[in-house]
Amino acid sequence: MAFVNLQNVTYKYPLTKTPVLQNINLQVNEGEFVAVMGPNGAGKSTLCYALAGFVPHFFKGEISGSIEVDGKKSSESTLDEWVLNVGLAFQNPFNQISGAKYTVFEEIAFGLENIGVPREEMKDRVDEAMSLTGISDLADRSPYSLSGGQQQRVALTSILVMRPRLLVLDEPTSQMDPIGTREVFGVVRKMAEEGMTVVMVEHKVEWIAHFADRVIALKEGRVFLEGKPNDVLTSDLLVENGFGISRYTSAAREAKKQGLWKKDKLPVTLFEAAEGFKP
Amino acid sequence: MKISINDLRFTYPAGVEALRGISLEINPGEQVAIVGQNGAGKTTLVRHFNGLLRPSSGSVWVGDWDTSKYSVAKLASRVGYVFQNPDEQLFSRDVLTEVAFGPKNLGYKKNKVDELVGCALALTELNDKTETNPYDLSPTWRKMVALASIIAMDTPIVIFDEPTTGQDAVNIARIANVIAEIKKEGKTVITITHDIDFCAENFERVIALSNGEVLLDGEAHDVLGREEILAKTYVDPPQLTRLGKALGLKETVINQEEFLNALK
Ligand SMILES: Nc1ncnc2c1ncn2[C@@H]1O[C@H](COP(=O)(O)OP(=O)(O)OP(=O)(O)O)[C@@H](O)[C@H]1O
Ligand SMILES: Nc1ncnc2c1ncn2[C@@H]1O[C@H](COP(=O)(O)OP(=O)(O)OP(=O)(O)O)[C@@H](O)[C@H]1O
Ligand SMILES: [Mg+2]
Ligand SMILES: [Mg+2]
């Protein structure tokens, strides 16, 4: 039985005329790292909200089908119960700072404090999480006086520190520097290996290919393609449907037309591209 | 219009030394990308160009104006700045009012305002959203509104702070097109970005900042090929530059055309 199980989920916000998610079926195993990609407005954030219980509990609207995490149905839980298992990092990190705390350390400890984690353990967990995301030296700073990427790291850290069983990340690296982005993917990969289940919305194809187990490509509220990163990310259907692809893939596709790429399969990663282009 | 930055230092009131002596000249009509790690000081730097921040020491000149002697409102006629977070920028009830606010405020005649707003909406493809409240749009479209409302001001210098964040391939192409159009008009475009492939494909000059200082500054090929130095500020070279290196190509290539030519 999959850890996350969405069956025929169709959902419409109170104000939208047509459904934003249409007949979504999605199973994710425990410890699996699934990346979700898609054009703007495809429904990626809405899918995150559905996994995190905000759809429909917070946003209301009309939903059909079923959403289960760890055998429990979202429709039979309250949002308060649900968030104990599922952590969501919002797409806009600027709105995620609680406003209740004076330092970055306290901001990250806030959630643990709320569930009554003892002081000592709390400190260890916060320190560990901050070092994972590279913000240890910001511990005493105000959570408001940070750069965009630093704020995003704080938002991400305050979710990671809770160690949710299902981690839902909505474009968690959108403000991050390139090497920091790669490191965050690495951290998420490691969390998955330790048993956390991860659903991560991302546009950065190269790192999806490197780190994720599976990719879901969403379009207009439906699952458009699904499968192993290398299969999905090299599909000819992506570009014409508004999806981004890696520069390796597009260069090889063009090179193929000119007889400079000889393999059947197109590359997504640097390694695959270098292998295929080697004389 | 030229920007001259002379030994610029800036320390935030809380004590963070964000800029530690920056000197740069940005010439009229240049297309400049600024890259560098989170917290390097990119946003802090460009906020000095339109007067949102004032130097702790050193100076920033925009044309013949010393920015420390001009108000933000005055500087708005020379420098347009699109915020990293659109929610700090947008305040109007609908998209049309938002986009028209800047040019109206600069005192342009109604005809000119209408023309500029029309162009900005067309370039960003917001024509079907003019009556929508920006806050009912998705964060990605809010960014496009923020962008439209600045380009409508028709300033000789335009600054984009992370314009491609969260945008899909179609919107990124739109933004690249906006930049190309502004360039044609002879304006200066300064763009902060973490998207190094986008940077390689759209900018002639790249400045890498690190810890409040200029780490590299030069022609895009020269800067983007320096893998080891860029790593100090957490930047990777573009994908095809890395591929070119892995294949042992002699020249630094930064985009697809150059890469394919080098293979032949
Ligand atoms: N709170 C809301 N009320 C009404 N409609 C909404 C709401 N949030 C999103 N929508 C609409 O639902 C659709 C899917 O939006 P969603 O934010 O899930 O897309 P996305 O794939 O995350 O897009 P992006 O890449 O822009 O973040 C869009 O048409 C959007 O306008
Ligand atoms: N309002 C503020 N008060 C105090 N310090 C600040 C403030 N804003 C930014 N800083 C600090 O100044 C330094 C430079 O920040 P800046 O926002 O310029 O970085 P950036 O290069 O734009 O980073 P990013 O890529 O994350 O957007 C950082 O150490 C940051 O924490
Ligand atoms: Mg979204
Ligand atoms: Mg910034």
Image (spheres, coloured by chain):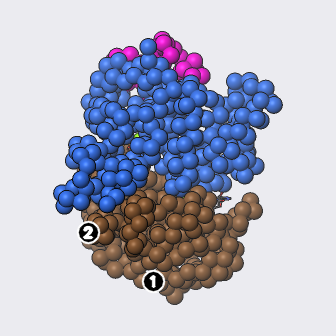
Q: Colour of chain A?
A: blue
For disc 1, the chain is B
**Which x, y percent locates residue A83?**
56, 24
* Residue A50 appearing in the image: yes
Q: Nearer the viewer, residue A72 or B154?
A: A72
Crowd class of label 1 (few under 14; some 14 to 19; many from 20; radius 10 Å): some
**Which x, y percent locates residue B18?**
67, 66
Crowd class of label 2 (few under 14; some 14 to 19; many from 20; radius 10 Å): few
Outermost residue toward the bottom in this view: B64
**Which x, y percent locates residue B121?**
29, 59
Q: Earlier in the sequence, mark 1 or mark 2?
A: 1
Please say whether residue B260 is one of the residues in the magenta stretch. Answer: no
Residue pictured at 56% horizontal, 26% vertical: A195
Q: What span is colored magenta in the figure?
A: A57-85
Please say whether residue A83 is one of the residues in the magenta stretch. Answer: yes
In the picture, the disc for residue B27 is 1
Q: Where's the N terminus of chain B, which quadrant?
A: bottom left
